[in-house]
Image (cartoon, rainbow, N blue to C red):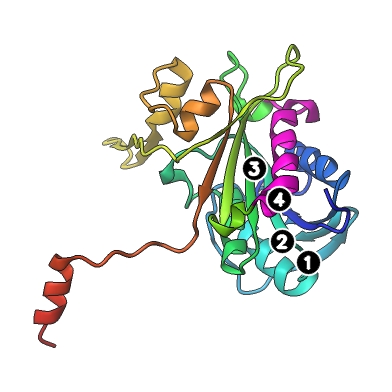
Amino acid sequence: MSESLSLLLTNDDGVDSTGFRALYDALDAVADVTAVAPADDQSAVGRQLSADVDVAEHELGYVVHGTPADCTVVGLEALCPDVDMVVAGCNKGANLGAYVLGRSGTVSAAVEAAFFDVPAIAVSMYVPPSGDTPWNETAEDPADYRHATAAATYLVDRAPEAGVFEEAEYLNVNAPMATDDEDEPASLEVTTPSTLYEMTAKRNEENERITLHDGVWEMMRGGDLPDPEGTDRRAVVEGRVSVSPLTAPHTTRHHDALDSLAESYQA
């Protein structure tokens, strides 16, 4: 990798998260990395933007009292406008499936970069079920993230010159959590986001509260995963690093039905 390559590194778990530091250290060994990361946990805020944000210097770069999308905009416009790429992560918890892309702060930081025409990579790590231990209390060792950091470093190094970003605006990378008995990096698979969707909402008649529930995670815990081969979730659950090449602008397609309605519309 060229030493002149400059990166803006952000995330949504906050600047002090284990995954962020693990990815910073891995990339800092091979590139000029400037952290522009949220001051605290901003998970699942999507592309939420602020009108203004407070920014402070940090030993790794800058800390922003705002969202991941704020960090991308502030970084590219004001703090480090000449970077070659934006990398977001490493998120503790996978960002898998088409329906998750718009919710994830990690992915949204990469999407925001794409609208600046800056190549971007979102990096997340799948945390598998671990008995009675809550998932958010696991993965506290930087070594747990080594599949994610290895894949991210490889893609940062190779993807631009290979022409990857001539076809994709950003990459959504999801890696399995590393275990102590693994010496080799996990293999890498190019995937498409799964279209499986199992959100439910149940009303509690006693207190009028409505509970939203994502059934996909239950399926993953139980090993009952109907995702076909070639999808991001299937790859990660089976121990491979998933890389989905994605475009940021929404696609549009003209069709006769809507064209006909538009032609017959009377204001």
Type of residue at label 3? Val
Which residue carries the number 4 mark? Answer: 40
Which residue carries the number 2 mark? Answer: 65
Q: Residue at x 61, y 27 (%)?
A: 127
Q: CA distance from mark 2 to mark 4?
A: 8 Å
Type of residue at label 2? His
Marks 3 & 1, CB-CB < 8 Å contact: no
Q: Which residues make up the magenta segment?
A: 138-162
In the drawing, does residue 104 fall left or right of residue 25?
Answer: left
Which residue carries the number 1 mark? Answer: 55
Any mark on residue 123, and which? 3
- Where is residue 200? Give x, y as percent: 32, 36
Q: CA distance from mark 3 to mark 1?
A: 24 Å
Return the disc, 2 or 3, that comes first in the chain's sequence: 2
Q: Residue at x 79, y 68 (%)?
A: 80
Any mark on residue 1, and which? none
Return the disc, 2 or 4, that comes first in the chain's sequence: 4
Marks 1 & 2, CB-CB < 8 Å contact: yes
Return the disc, 3 or 1, that comes first in the chain's sequence: 1
